[in-house]
C-alpha cells in the first residue's frame, strides 16, 4: 500500500494487486469473500462449512471447550500474578503451566492437547498485543484490552486444531479426542487444509472454518475507472448511474418483527440474580435470528454490488470514509442500516481478490470542491442542499455525483465530462 495524491490535495491510499502474504477467506455456506493478511501463510483462504453435530458430538465438543475455557482462565490468573510480581508471562511459561496442569489433573488429560496448546498461543498473542498498545500509548478508545476471564454462560465454544489434530474422511471431520462430525459441503476444498477452527454461533449453529491455499483470480482488464462517494440516502453514489447502490433498508424492514420480540423480552426479563425463563430465552433467540438475518442481507447486498463494480472497472477511487461519527448524529439509525463500513470493506476485499487497484481518497472537502474546475466553496454545504453549483465555472450537478467525480480527480484519474480529455502527462482511462 502506498500514499499518493496531487499537489495541494489530501493523500490517497492505493492498494495494488494482491501479492504473497495475503490470506483470502471464503465462507462456503454463504459464498462470502474476505481478505486478511498473514505474513506466515502466503496466499490462502478459509472455507467455512456448516456442521451437522449429533448429541454425542455436541457433548464431547462442549466438554473439550470446558477444558479449554479452564486453561484460558488459568492463563488470565497467571498473567495477573506475573504483573503483580513483575515477572514474564510468555508462551514458554504458559506451556510449562499447561504441562504441569495436565500431569496433575486427569480431567484435562481426557481431552486433546492440540486445542489446549492453540489456546495458549491465542492467549499469548492477545496479551502481547495489549502490552504493545500500552507501551505505544495508544488512545484508550483504540487500545486492545488485556485478556479477560471467559464465563461459563455467555461465551461460545471455539476450538482450533492444527494439521495433526484433525483429518477429513468420507465427508466427515474427525477431530483429536475421537470426535466426528458431518460437514455440509457446498463445494470441494481446492487443496488440503492446514488448520481448522470449530465454533458455535449465538444461535447454536456449529461451523468449521478450514484454511487452504488458493491462487489469485484476476479478471480481464476493462480500461475503465470509477469514483465512489458514500452517503446515507444512497449508500454509494458513483460516476456510473448503473452502479449506484441505493439504501437497501434491511433493518427498517425487520424493525417491526424485532420490536415484537424485544417487547416480549422486556416483559419476561428475569429478576436480578435469577435464571431466565423459557419464554425469555425463546424471545431472545428469535430476536437474535432477526439480527442475524439482517446482517446477512446487508453482507449479501454489499458483496453482490462489490462484485459488479470490480468486474466492470480496473481502478476504483473510493472515499476513505469513517462512518463512526454518524453514530452520534440524528442519522445514526439510518446510517447503521446502510452498513457503509461493511460495504467499503467488501469492496476493497473484492478488488484485492481480483487484482484491481483501489485508491482510498481522503474525504476532506470532497463536497466543497468542483470536479470541473477545482474551485472550492467558501462554506460547507448543508445536508439539505442536494445540488452543487460552482460559482467559478457555473457547473451544476447533483451533490453526490460531483463528490464521486472529485474522487477521480484526487486519485489522478480522468472524470468523464470534466474536460473531455486527459490531464497533462500519460493518457488516463476514461471514467464511466
Image (cartoon, helix red, strand yellow):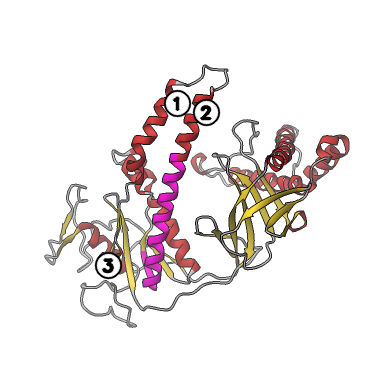
Image-based side of 153 in relation to 270, left or right? right
Q: In the rendered view, would you say 405 is above or below 208?
A: below
Residue 244 location, quadrant: bottom left
| Highlighted magenta segment, given as a residue range | 290-317
Res 12 visible: no
Q: Secondary structure at mark 1?
A: helix
Spatial distance from mark 1 to mark 2, Cα to Cα?
8 Å
Residue 168 location, quadrant: bottom right
* Residue depth check, mark 2 versus mark 3: number of the one nearer the observer: 2
Q: Position of residue 412 (x, y in %)?
A: 34, 72
At x 43% / y 53%, what residue is drawn? 299
At x 20% / y 75%, what residue is drawn? 419
Task: Specify the label residue 265 is tagged with.
Answer: 1
Q: Position of residue 252 (x, y in %)?
A: 32, 41
Tell me the residue that label 2 is attached to.
281
Q: Earlier in the sequence, mark 2 or mark 3?
A: 3
Amino acid at each position: 500500500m502506498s500514499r499518493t495524491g496531487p499537489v495541494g490535495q489530501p493523500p490517497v491510499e492505493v492498494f495494488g494487486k494482491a501479492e504473497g502474504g495475503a490470506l483470502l477467506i471464503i465462507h462456503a455456506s454463504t459464498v462470502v469473500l474476505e481478505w486478511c493478511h498473514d505474513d506466515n501463510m502466503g496466499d490462502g483462504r478459509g472455507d467455512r462449512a456448516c456442521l451437522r453435530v449429533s448429541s454425542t458430538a455436541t457433548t464431547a465438543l462442549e466438554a473439550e471447550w470446558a477444558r479449554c475455557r479452564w486453561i484460558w482462565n488459568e492463563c488470565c490468573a497467571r498473567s495477573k500474578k506475573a504483573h503483580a510480581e513483575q515477572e514474564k508471562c510468555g508462551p514458554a511459561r504458559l506451556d510449562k503451566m499447561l504441562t504441569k496442569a495436565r500431569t496433575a489433573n486427569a480431567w484435562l488429560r481426557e481431552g486433546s492437547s492440540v486445542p489446549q496448546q492453540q489456546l495458549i498461543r491465542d492467549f499469548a498473542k492477545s496479551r502481547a498485543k495489549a502490552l504493545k498498545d500500552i507501551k505505544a500509548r495508544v488512545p484508550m478508545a483504540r487500545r486492545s484490552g488485556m485478556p479477560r476471564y471467559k464465563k461459563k454462560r455467555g461465551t461460545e465454544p471455539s476450538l482450533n486444531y492444527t494439521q495433526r489434530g484433525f483429518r477429513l474422511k468420507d465427508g466427515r471431520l474427525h477431530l483429536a479426542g475421537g470426535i466426528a462430525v458431518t460437514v455440509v459441503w457446498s463445494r470441494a476444498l481446492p487443496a488440503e487444509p492446514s488448520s481448522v477452527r470449530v465454533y458455535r454461533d449465538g444461535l447454536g449453529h456449529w461451523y468449521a472454518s478450514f484454511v487452504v491455499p488458493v491462487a489469485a483470480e484476476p479478471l480481464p482488464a476493462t480500461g475503465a475507472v470509477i469514483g465512489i462517494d458514500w452517503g446515507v440516502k444512497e449508500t454509494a453514489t458513483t460516476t456510473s448511474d448503473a452502479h449506484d447502490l441505493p439504501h437497501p433498508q434491511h433493518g427498517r424492514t425487520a424493525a417491526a418483527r424485532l420490536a415484537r420480540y424485544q417487547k416480549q423480552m422486556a416483559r419476561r426479563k428475569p429478576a436480578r440474580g435469577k435464571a431466565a425463563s423459557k419464554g425469555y430465552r425463546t424471545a431472545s433467540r428469535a430476536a437474535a435470528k432477526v439480527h442475524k438475518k439482517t446482517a446477512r442481507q446487508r453482507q449479501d447486498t454489499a458483496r453482490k454490488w462489490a462484485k459488479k463494480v470490480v468486474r466492470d472497472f480496473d481502478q476504483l477511487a473510493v472515499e476513505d470514509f469513517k462512518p463512526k461519527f454518524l453514530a452520534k448524529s440524528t442519522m445514526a439509525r439510518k446510517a447503521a442500516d446502510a452498513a457503509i463500513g461493511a460495504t467499503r470493506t467488501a469492496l476493497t476485499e473484492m478488488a484485492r481478490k481480483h487484482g484491481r487497484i483501489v485508491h482510498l481518497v481522503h474525504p476532506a472537502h470532497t463536497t466543497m470542491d468542483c470536479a470541473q474546475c477545482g474551485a472550492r466553496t467558501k462554506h460547507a454545504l448543508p445536508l439539505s442542499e442536494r445540488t452543487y453549483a460552482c460559482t467559478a465555472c457555473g457547473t451544476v450537478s447533483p451533490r453526490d455525483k460531483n463528490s464521486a467525480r472529485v474522487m477521480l480527480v484526487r486519485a489522478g484519474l480522468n472524470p468523464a465530462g470534466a474536460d473531455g480529455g486527459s490531464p497533462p502527462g500519460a493518457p488516463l482511462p476514461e471514467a464511466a
